[in-house]
Image (cartoon, rainbow, N blue to C red):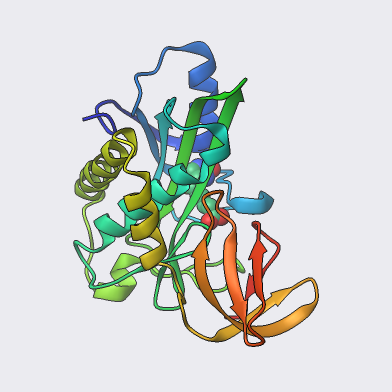
Amino acid sequence: MIIGSYLLFFKNLPSTNNHSAILLKNHDLPEGTIVYTNYQSAGRGQTGKRWESEDDKNLLISIVLSPSMINPADQFLISMTVSLGICDFLKRYIPACTIKWPNDIYVNNDKIAGILIENSIMGDQIENTIAGIGLNVNQEKFLSDAPNPISLSMITGKNFDLKTCLNQLASDLDIRYEQLISESFAQIKHEYVSQLYRLNEWCNFRDINGIYTGRILSVTDYGRLQIEKQTGHKSEYSFKEVDFML
Ligand code: BTN
């Protein structure tokens, strides 16, 4: 076991990703160390947004990895691997979830988990990765302006033991990380694509030229989203170049 072999708990932190980076600077953390907390005073989401999480209700974790087998150009594999591990965990409790490209975890049209992956690259190698995960477990009310948060308890009507969830999530992520280590890259990509939110569904997207109807075909090895327009024209997008019209 790599992921979760070493757990570091803090009652509260500004951000588990930030704290992991500080720890990494000053200590030799074993690969797979999980830094986790009950509360973040400055939890970070993608594109500079805040991550909302009520005290002691959800999983707030960062995993420290050294994926030296991954070429920096292929770093999207890490996102795919983490997304799949979270979906494996959720399927223990709910029948289905999807991955909204690039790495939001959705149940129907609502977001249950977010991922913030930060890689430090040295030359042609990924020196280390901090994979931050916020997974909504027991929170019932969300106060921020995030459009569509949901939690496991809102879906199931049950309350979950956070430590049990953490151990299960670590184990599911570990199995996926072994898949990455064994270089099953095509399999990881295949499973990721097959679980994409709105895969092959005609729906509306917005890019720099406006709103159009299209359908997701796949992602490239570099993580760009491939969409076919109704006209038959195919486009590829990097993160933030296209929005889903929810
Ligand atoms: C997103 O915006 O979807 C990404 C959210 C990532 C939140 C997690 S919570 C644990 C880790 N520490 C942070 O500060 N952010 C990530």
Task: Name the spot of residue 246 as percent of width and height, x first.
Answer: 57, 80
Q: Between residue 111 and residue 176, name the one nearer to us.
A: 176
Q: Can see residue 59?
A: no
Residue at image location 52% in from the left, 40% down from the top? 74
Q: Is residue 181 left or right of residue 71?
A: left
Q: Can see residue 228?
A: yes
Q: Is residue 36 above or below residue 56?
A: above
Q: Is residue 155 above or below residue 23?
A: below
Q: Between residue 163 and residue 238, name the one nearer to us.
A: 238
Q: Please tell me how many numbered marks the rendered image carries.
A: 0
Residue at image location 62% in from the left, 69% down from the top? 145
Task: Name the spot of residue 72 as percent of width and height, x first.
Answer: 56, 33
Residue at image location 68% in from the left, 49% down from the top? 48
In the rendered image, which quarter contains the N terminus? top left
Q: Residue furthest right?
A: 209
Q: Between residue 39 and residue 214, name the one nearer to us.
A: 214
Task: Name the spot of residue 12 as percent of width and height, x first.
Answer: 45, 37
Q: Is residue 212 above or below residue 243?
A: below
Which of the 4 quarters of the picture holds residue 139?
bottom left
Residue at image location 67% in from the left, 52% down from the top? 47
Q: Is residue 133 above or below residue 202?
A: above
Task: Name the spot of residue 172 as percent of width and height, x first.
Answer: 24, 47
